[in-house]
Image (cartoon, rainbow, N blue to C red):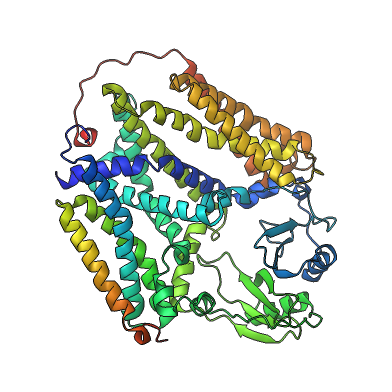
């Protein structure tokens, strides 16, 4: 791949960063969101949401490297993470319901 | 760039970079499938197979006589079929340092210290690097998941390659066949083990739920999620404790005949002291979640564990990973598939290497040196550890650390050797295999010289397959190494030129 790759060093570094940090952030956001909004009791919400997080991170990594444009990757990752975290952390009383 | 091309790049580099670390994790985990059998091999006092006659109260008495510090907690394991002896561990208050002892079933005294089979278990999940190691292993597990998924995406002929092996094809193609074969055969296992592996430490890796739903209250989080009991310290001296053996007997009755697997006492010197008795079982994938909690002074039953559905799912996943169910057959299958995982990694690196050896490329020397240092280094150092286990005198102070230093020192030597000899990888490998053959096949002999009841001539006639199995495995491994070393030492035949089809995977 290295011989005929159109990717520059910097764009590869950007994708690696997006996969490691952005992918984790998205998994974190999804876990926080599901820990609040799943229609289950609190311990089950948290456990099932957390167990799912690794699948989300893996899928995010695959998406980061499969996507054509790096800008779209960052927009999706940052946007989704922000939305999910806002929805999860704003209603504090709803989040800690038993 | 097509999806297949970008995934090929991800698979190549995201697979190459962590592969030596993953090899260490997977091989250590593979060995740890039989950690308890290895543990018994490493403790000659257990070779005769005597039954322990102690009780939980005698174990606690030993602790009270010999350890005067204020304890945060202590815990013990009663004898089981695979571990026929009492184990005791304790943590001194405010030190977070854990110490442990194993009791000789015949004399009731502590056995000679050893790192035991547990050494490989800890190497597997934490690299002996504490919490930092747990995070490193978790990240490596994520790389493994990504490599598995991207590997499937670039692999079009997944069914056909199942039946394809061309050992006489040119090097790169043959190694790619091997990589594909082990990858396809082991895929479901490796995917499940990678996922369940990272899931075990989910509470360390993904604290989002703890933060948003429990507002970072760790005690509350764990007791609610596990359905367990927790009592804060009262800072008043404890009343004299009730008999642990009586609590064990009561627990057996309450479970309707189950066996205890773990007896732990929290804050034993404080009035808040509680005794947890965890049930043990091997008939299901998940360990039983029926822990009983008693007041340590009155013996009153305080709590019966009620695990929520989520925690039951979690412990099923963890049980699937830890292979404590179903007996030796399951563990043997895990061992074989774990070895297939190691072969998958080695094959993958060889594909990378052969392609670049043919057309030139950066990093060949580094990869070769790492291969020699890690792929051969870990098995050789593990064998050296077993030699150290028998040759270090039983009475030596800090004996377990001496064993660990044998492991570290011999690995460093092999690494140095691999770096110096990296320009002749074939000769290096042949010599390493020869050394492995000597070390592995020598161990059953050494066992015969150092243990009257442990050698094959004693263990086979009494049908002690758990102990004999370790020796037989070492003999078979030594023989295999010798054959491979002999094969590699023969002068290399010039491969006949063949018509070569270029496949998409090779270009990748």
Compare residues A92 and B429 and report the one nearer the observer: A92
Question: From the image, which quarter does the N terminus of chain B lie in?
Answer: top left
Residue drawn at (31%, 34%), measured in percent from left and top?
B176
Q: Quadrant of residue B394?
A: top right
The C terminus of chain B sits in image quarter = top left
Asked if residue B217 lies left or right of residue B400, the reply is left
Q: Which corner quadrant of the image does residue B245 belong to?
A: bottom right
Would residue B8 be seen by someone viewing this image from the given angle? no
| B314 versus B212 height, above or below | above
Please say if A43 is above or below B78: below
As drawn, B458 above or below A20: above
For image coordinates 25% across by 53% down, the residue present is A62
Between B6 and B455, the one lying in front of the other is: B6
The reply to whether residue B234 is in sight is yes
Q: Is residue B179 above or below residue A37?
A: above
State the image coordinates of residue B274 (x, y, percent, origin top left): 69, 79
Where's residue B38, x and y in %? Answer: 64, 47
Q: What's the residue at 59%, 36% (across, down)?
A: B381
Would residue B358 be found to the left or right of residue B323 on screen? left
Between B397 and B331, the residue placed more toward the observer is: B397
């Amino acid at each position: 791949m290295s011989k005929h790759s159109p990717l520059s060093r910097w764009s590869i570094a950007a994708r690696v960063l997006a996969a490691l940090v952005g992918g984790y952030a998205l998994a974190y956001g999804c876990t926080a969101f599901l820990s609040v909004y799943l229609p289950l009791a609190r311990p089950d919400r948290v456990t099932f949401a957390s167990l799912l997080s690794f699948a989300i991170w893996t899928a995010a990594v695959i998406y980061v490297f499969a996507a054509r444009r790096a800008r779209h990757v960052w927009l999706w990752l940052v946007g989704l993470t922000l939305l999910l975290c806002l929805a999860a952390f704003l209603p504090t009383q709803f989040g800690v319901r038993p | 760039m097509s999806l297949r091309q970008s995934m090929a790049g991800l698979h190549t580099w995201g697979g190459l970079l962590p592969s030596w670390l993953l090899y260490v994790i997977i091989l250590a985990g593979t060995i740890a499938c039989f950690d308890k059998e290895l543990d018994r091999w490493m403790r000659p006092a257990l070779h005769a197979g005597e039954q322990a006659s102690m009780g939980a109260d005698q174990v606690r008495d030993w602790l009270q006589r010999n350890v005067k510090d204020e304890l945060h907690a202590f815990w013990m394991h009663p004898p089981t079929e695979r571990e026929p002896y009492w184990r005791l561990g304790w943590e001194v208050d405010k030190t977070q340092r854990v110490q442990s002892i194993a009791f000789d079933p015949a004399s009731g005294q502590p056995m000679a210290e050893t790192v035991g089979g547990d050494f490989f278990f800890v190497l597997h999940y934490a690299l002996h690097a504490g919490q930092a190691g747990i995070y490193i292993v978790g990240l490596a597990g994520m790389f493994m998941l990504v490599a598995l998924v991207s590997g499937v995406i670039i692999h079009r002929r997944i069914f056909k390659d199942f039946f394809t092996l061309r050992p006489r094809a040119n090097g790169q193609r043959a190694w790619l066949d091997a990589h594909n074969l082990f990858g396809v055969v082991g895929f479901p296992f490796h995917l499940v083990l990678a996922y369940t592996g990272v899931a075990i430490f989910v509470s360390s890796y993904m604290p989002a739920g703890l933060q948003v739903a429990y507002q970072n209250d760790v005690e509350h989080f764990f007791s609610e999620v596990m359905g367990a009991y927790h009592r804060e310290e009262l800072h008043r001296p404890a009343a004299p404790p009730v008999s642990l053996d009586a609590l064990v007997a009561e627990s057996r009755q309450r479970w309707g005949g189950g066996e205890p697997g773990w007896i732990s006492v929290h804050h034993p010197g404080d009035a808040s002291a509680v005794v947890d008795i965890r049930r043990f079982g091997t008939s299901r994938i998940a360990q039983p979640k029926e822990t009983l909690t008693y007041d340590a002074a009155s013996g009153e039953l305080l709590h019966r564990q009620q695990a929520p559905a989520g925690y039951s799912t979690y412990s099923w996943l963890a049980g699937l990973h830890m292979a404590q169910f179903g007996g030796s057959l399951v563990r043997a299958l895990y061992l074989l598939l774990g070895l297939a995982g190691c072969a998958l990694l080695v094959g993958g690196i060889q594909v990378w290497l052969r392609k670049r050896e043919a057309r030139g490329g950066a990093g060949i020397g580094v990869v070769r040196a790492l291969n020699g240092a890690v792929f051969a280094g870990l098995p050789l150092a593990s064998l050296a550890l077993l030699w150290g286990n028998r040759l270090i005198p039983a009475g030596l102070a800090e004996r377990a650390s001496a064993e660990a230093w044998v492991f570290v020192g011999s690995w460093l030597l092999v690494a140095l050797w691999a770096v110096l000899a990296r320009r002749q990888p074939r000769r290096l490998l042949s010599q390493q295999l020869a050394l492995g053959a000597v070390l592995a096949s020598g161990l059953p002999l050494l066992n015969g010289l150092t243990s009257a009841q442990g050698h094959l001539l004693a263990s086979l006639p009494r049908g002690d397959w758990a102990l004999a199995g370790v020796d037989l495995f070492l003999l078979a491994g030594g023989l295999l190494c010798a054959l491979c070393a002999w094969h590699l030492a023969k002068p290399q035949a010039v491969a006949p030129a063949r018509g070569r089809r270029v496949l998409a995977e090779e270009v990748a």
